[in-house]
Amino acid sequence: MKKMTKILCIVLALVMLLGLAACVQRSDEPEPSDIAPTDSLQPGDTTPPVTPADPGNDNGNGNGNGNGNGEEPPAPPVAANHPLASMNAALLNFPQYRETGGAHVAGSTFYQAIVTDAAIPGNFGGAIFSDAAVDSIVQGFIGTSASVLSSTSTFTFGQEGIATFEYCLDDYTFTITQQHDVLWHDGTPLTMADLAFTYYILADPDYRGIRFSRYPREIVGIMDYHNGDADYIAGLVLSDDNRTLTMHFNLMSPGMLMGGIWTSPMPRHIFENIAVADMPSSPYVLTNPVGWGPFKIENIIPGESVFMSRFDDFVWGTPYIEYVMVERISSSLVPAAMQNGRFDNVSPSFPTIYYGDHMNPTNFTYLGSPMSNYSYVAFRLGHWCFDTNQNVFTPEREMNNVYLRRAMAHAINQDEIGELLFNGLQFAAGSFIPASHYSLMDLSLPGFPYNPEYAMQILDDGGFPLGDDGFRTWPDGSPLTVVWGRIGDASTDHIIVPLYQQYWAAIGINVELWQGRTHDQNFMWDTLDYDTDNDEIHIYTASWTNVGPNPQGRWGHLQWNPSRYTSDEWDRLVSNLSDIRMFDEAFMQNAYAEMQAYMQENVFFFPGRWSVQLTSLNNRVANWDTRPGLSPQTNGFHRTRLTAAEPYGR
């Protein structure tokens, strides 16, 4: 247990701050919310019982030291029966980095696979136009989504990037100062004017991406610019040499320090003459993106592959590797491709479903790290209002019955799925908080452990009678069929889909796939985000990846929150995450506890599984590290070497 706790402290601990009055030059920590349960019970319903707490769960008491000195305190203890303990134990079987000897072989190509059953969307010119994980892999090589600030082991902004930062709580300012000379791939110098310009793109009324969210909207004057009442953004102030950008905010909270402030610049000299509405379809986004990363694009086969060459003037030094070839591959083909030396690495992860048959490879090696996401099942509870850009709760939606939602949550045996299907590398997510922010978890809450008998009791109490066919009906006697929108996964659909349906059928809930099948991820997300399913989809499955614990980016008033859940109380809780009192550790801890209690009570989604991320590396790859928070100056793909001309196995 001591080893497990040590790993947890290194990988998952948070740094908290107290400092409420002074200007602080460096900060490493997160942010939280408030509660009072109100929900979407149908007329005449009463709140069903909440599952009794598991007495074996420890009550998380926070890990902040409250003195604002930047030291990382130890995480609370992990109970032996808590899912995090199982994940930590699994992580002991894998190293997190590899540093091997051997000289780099000049002229060699690094072969990178993107694991996806769908076409690569191909939106490479900037993360402000895409949230597709597969696009972000290419963006990482070319630097179109790169932050000017580094990241710490606790996922807050650090001081080792091309710029440093300081913030002041007295005057609500956040200042970024460029410390290193950087060139875009076309040789043009990068400055903080590029970052300021990016905010003008975000605030443009024709911007249709996902990044104009809570914190950018709090910049002084940005909404005046967005609404056409001002010609400039008053809260963005550049120094005369364009190397310092000071941002003035209407409010501040710790969430700003965990990616809440957008720090990835767009090349102003390229995009300033392109209308914002035309940017997503421009060649500088789709076919000829200009970044500042270690590699630059040479050729693209749309949807299939990207070929890159190294950028000799990369800010942290010329990369060893000369060329990178990125290709997409179906997950079912990954094991054979790695064994045969087709690829040096697959991203975002080696599919854990195949790990059991490939535990001891001879030509490649596994690294293991905790994924910062969890899977979930969400319920469609409203619609998106395009006039007001708000989620609107719709009482008439089928899933607006908390009895039904809670029962479905308790019907799934997530641990069994993780053990049998994913070779013990996935675990029931015992919290609404991502595993990377363990100190904010309220472990007194029961979550939704597998308990089909209890699920049956909930449905009985909610008035859902069991018919002669073994399936439930609505309280009025009409047939009950839940329609499931699912993104296809060729490697698991044939097992996961019928297994989930069997779990739900065991408590009398008939669940059918939307249109009788799974769907391409690009099509499914467009359908959900734009509500083009005509209210036909009742539930959907996805995963939440977030560097911070704030759920606003997934469950707030955003078009890409397809659950559409909202309430006055939930809005208040999310709003509280931006309160300046969040810099006080006790306030933060309490706010997150209240938020989690609300989620437990109202069940607009339920967590699925945490997982270990497997990085598979061909044995010729040297210098690769999956640990968070390393300095980009001395660690990164520019330091990776290839010690053989071709991947071993070819």
Image (spheres, rainbow, N blue to C red):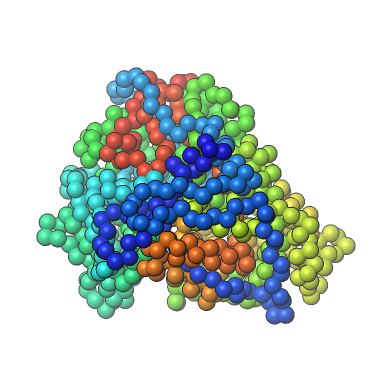
Residue in the foreground of this view, choosing between 415 and 18: 18
Q: Position of residue 522 (x, y in %)?
A: 50, 53
Task: Give the quadrant of residue 41.
Answer: bottom right
Residue at horizontal 48%, vertical 39%?
6
Task: Give the quadrant of residue 642.
Answer: top left
Q: Position of residue 461 (x, y in %)?
A: 78, 69
Counting the numbered discs, the total is: 0
Residue in the foreground of this view, choosing between 274 and 346: 346
Residue at horizontal 41%, vertical 39%?
627
Residue furthest left as drawn: 240
Q: In the displayed structure, does residue 333 sit left or right of residue 452?
A: left
Residue at horizontal 39%, vertical 68%?
581
Q: Is residue 411 visible?
A: yes
Q: Position of residue 304 (x, y in %)?
A: 44, 41
Q: Is residue 359 above or below residue 5?
A: above
Q: Is residue 299 visible?
A: no
Residue in the foreground of this view, choosing between 61 and 249: 61
Residue furthest right as drawn: 468
Residue at horizontal 78%, vertical 61%?
456
Q: In the displayed structure, does residue 529 sit left or right of residue 474?
A: left
